[in-house]
Image: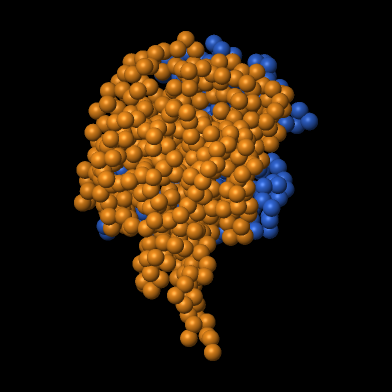
Chain colours: A blue, B orange
Amino acid sequence: MAGKPRVAVHKFASCDGCQLAFLNLGEELLTLTRLVDIVHFAEAGPVNPDAVVDIAFIEGSISTPEDLEHVRGIRANSRYLVTIGACATAGGLQALRNFAAAEEWVAAIYARPEYIHSLATSTPIAAHVKVDLELWGCPVNGRQLLAAVRALLSGVMPWFEKDKVCMECKRRQAVCVMVAQGLPCMGPVTRAGCGALCPSFGRDCYACFGPAENANTEALARRLEGLGLMPEAVARRFHFINSGASPFTEAGARRRTKHD
Amino acid sequence: MTEERRVPIQVPVLARVEGEGTLELRVRGGAIEEVRLRIFEPPRMFEKLLEGRDYSEVPDMVARICGICPVAYQMSAVHAIESLFGVDPGSWVRDLRRLLYCGEWMQSHSLHIHMLAAPDFLGYTGVTDMARDHAEEVRRGLGLQALGNDIIRLLGARSVHPVGVRVGGFHHVPPRAQAGALLDKLRAALPQAEALVRWTAAFDLPAMEQDFTAVALRHAREYPMNEGRLVSSHGLDVAIDQFETRFVEHQEPHSTALHCLHDGKPYLVGPLARLNLNLDRLPVPVRAVLENTGVKFPSRNMYHSVVARAVEILLALHEAIRILEAYHESPAPGVDVKPRAGTGYGCTEAPRGTLWHRYDIDAAGKVTHARIVPPTSQNQARIEADLRQALQAYGLDHEDAALRQRGEMTIRNYDPCISCATHFLDLRIHRVSCF
């Protein structure tokens, strides 16, 4: 490879919080910029959206007709395409609009809806182009990003845990908030990686890292009902940050039907 | 005979702002005919997403509006909902929420000053470039940013979309030992924050005074963060629930962010407006550092925003130290709440300015209607007014590249939070020449 590896960071519909995982790296950010050329990262300075790169990171979901065209261009220019965060990986919190009549929403918020060009849905990058690696989390953290850069530039896929938050909880020796407090914790179906932050703070996990591998959503849904949640409330637990991830889409939909 | 010539000039993306948009400039002869800051944030429609959700879900949802200032969204939301429910979480919670806000101001302002704004004032394309010649200052900035994040982590477990806040208080009582360790680090950083104020005050900033109306919260004793009345430099003084009587949002065809006007006119929110209106609320040592710089506040030079940000970092550090010195572990991290139907208002000072929320909630605790007015939509009309004056004063005969740089710098100076309000920013200059 001639010269330093080239990296781009792109943004679609999102909150910028996953890009911040780069900007919060501190000293490691300066090290990273010595090891790779960051050729496009508008929030930090370099602008070259059409650059050919080794790794393209994408934050944000696809929600406008222009986004579709843009993401295909990025795919064509990138050796590895990596999604960062819930928006790019599962459509984000804004994918909740996929369950509703989004056109009516635009009309309710904007006096002149004809000026707003928006798709009816908010969808993940993988719904439109091939994605090489998905980093889950709302937001992702610096460890995930650095592990991804390091592994991909060595020509291998990084290894990330796909097990449940419960495993991290046990390792941290946090008291189970579902057993001890009867809280509707999503840990049993949620992918590890955050460090079991919510249970260690005495609250229930809200599934911001998306579904774990082999998540038994039906068993958890029944347990949540056993804790006293109405089906509609169970549906809201699944239809939250990662409502577009199919195990959660389906688990929530089953409870919504039951409710109706 | 008059012949028109248009020379469109495009810059794909305005860099170093949080998000993307377009600046359109139409020049005819020697005058600016039109300035438009086009914002096309793909609408994420948060206000509608909130409808039908339980009040307890609101803090974690609204955080996702902005990864740079999630604490601000959580704070305006919990204050709105608690006032509606008639809940007072008490002084322990009140102090720690101020501490949490100090953390967010420190991280957000440090990020803006060092990574986004300073390269403009020192003549670099970005922070990497600047770090080669100003390594020590960049490290100092990264250090203050990290300390702000440490404060947020103490109370929220992580700095982006923290998980510690709930309606009624917090989820977690930080252990005393952790609070003590953080206090030591904060005390050690005071000289750095003071040096930062002096550094920004020494920037060679364009000297141009503008007339503008400044709007911010004002509190009886403190520099405003979570509480206060809405005041302005032109005599406004109202309770936050009166916001809608004096501030009106409207839609412009060129922007997906609603424009907000105060009594029909553009106005400024953010660090410069806050400092101009609350100088007498600065703690004495902070005031002394500011006075020694020789920069006079209240200031009508918009570029003094960068100095105001540095002053607010120092203020936040002082406040965080004061709160942590008095810290004790409370038996409970908050109080229980019981929903009731009604309308609640919350207004707090986000790093970028006043952030106003209104929620209608039913007796079961479900949100029936939400309205959120972020700082960037309030500043949008002011930014356009500033661009008009700044570029005219700079001289429209400058080459396109220079005009573009000056335009970008003028916009960046407001630290527009584009995720709250924008998407793609590129610059189009139409030169219409008369022959």
Relative image position of residue A133 (x, y in whole percent): 45, 44
| Residue B253 sits above or below residue B85 on the image | below
Comparing B252 with A12, the one in front is B252
Residue placed at 33% from the left, 57% from the top?
B207
Can you give x and y, in whole percent of width and height, for residue B80 in the image?
Answer: 59, 30
Viewer-closest of B157 and B313: B313
- Residue A221 vertical placement versus A51 (above, below): above
Q: What percent of the width, then of the height, locates residue A53?
A: 38, 56
Q: Is residue B329 visible?
A: yes
Q: Quick one: which residue is furthest to the right in this view?
A: A260
Could you tell me which quadrant the N terminus of chain B lies in? bottom right
The quarter of the picture where residue B243 lies is top right
Frontmost residue, B200 versus A257:
B200
- Residue at the spot 42% in from the left edge and 32% down from the top edge: B223
Q: Is residue B146 visible?
A: no
Residue lying farthest to the front in this orientation: B235
Residue A114 locus on image (x, y percent):
68, 58
Horizontal arrangement in the rendering, residue A260 relative to residue A158 (left or right): right
| In this rendering, position of residue B311 left or right of residue B428 | left
